[in-house]
Amino acid sequence: MTDEGFRHPRLAALYDPLDPDRGDLEAYLRMAEEFGARQVLDIGCGTGVFALLLAGRGIEVVGVDPAGASLDVARAKPGAGRVRWIHGDATDLPPLRVDLATMTANVAQAITDPEAWAGTLRGAREALRPGGRLVFETRDPARRGWEEWNREASWGVTEIEGVGAVESWVDLVEVSGPLVAFRWTYVFAADGAVLTSDSTLRFRERDEVERDLLAHGFVLEDVRDAPDRPGRELVFVARRP
């Protein structure tokens, strides 16, 4: 199920202003150039930041996301008409033939159900042309990044145009094996509304990801360090033979 933070219109509108620095996407833009990608499938495109960056470079982009509120934000942005937006996920895509499929940020880890993860890998492979690549990132479980997910480390107040001041923070809820649950809280100064969004991420070990890719017909080409979080995240590059 899509998190409230992405499907609730009031919270979806906060996503970009609360996380304005998307330097993490630079590595994906460089890979699109490295692989000569002219058609890209952005799985879990959210509010469309990466899809629109690609489209601005003349690349043909399909963005798919199950959260309608996030897609509404994406469709309202300048240049949105250059992207084909699909409300759904990678398990039920129309016929596509793309050079590159991506899952940026938390997208891969947010797919916690094993069957849904398997369906996503199958859908990505089917959408890729032979020789096309799937690229995504995942946090290294050994770094135990969730230990920093607390109010003390995350609390802040952001002034957002047209919204006013928004107070936000994250609390760790539970760690159960590879599953880590956490809750974001948002307080709107304008009317005192308090909204929360519960999320769960799956922290997959490197060998688990490699086995999954092999089982779904991919060839693992490379495992790279994430430039924005060196030593803390892995970026997988897999090819459809």
Image (cartoon, rainbow, N blue to C red):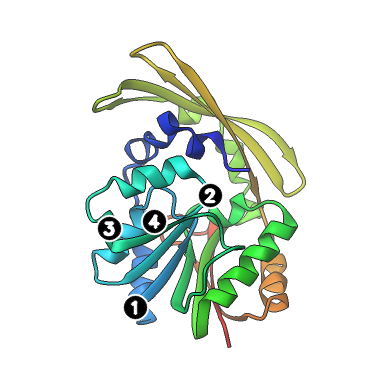
| Three-letter residue code for mark 2 | Pro
Picture disc at residue 66 = 2
Residue at the spot x=66%, y=37% of the render? 181
**Distance in Å between CA atoms under marks 2 and 3:** 19 Å
Find out whether the residues at labels 1 and 4 contact each other: C-beta distance under 8 Å: no
In this view, the residue in front, 233 or 97, is 97
In the picture, the disc for residue 81 is: 3
Under mark 1, the amino acid is Arg
Residue denoted by label 1: 38
At horizontal 63% and vertical 80% (from top left) the residue drawn is 218
**Along the viewing direction, whichever of 229 and 218 lies nearer the viewer:** 218
Q: Distance from label 4 to label 2 (Cα)?
A: 22 Å
Image: 101 above or below 52:
below
Mark 1 surroundings within 10 Å by alpha-carbon count, few (fewer than 14), some (14 through 19), many (20 or more): some
Q: Secondary structure at mark 4?
A: helix
Residue furthest right as drawn: 177
Q: Give the CA distance from mark 2 to mark 1.
A: 24 Å
**Can you give x and y, in whole percent of width and height, for residue 6 in the image?**
49, 39
Farthest residue toward the top?
A: 192
Mark 3 nearby-residue class (10 Å; few <14, some 14–19, many ≥20): few
First in residue order: circle 2 vs circle 3:
2
In the depicted view, which residue is nearer to us: 144 or 58? 58
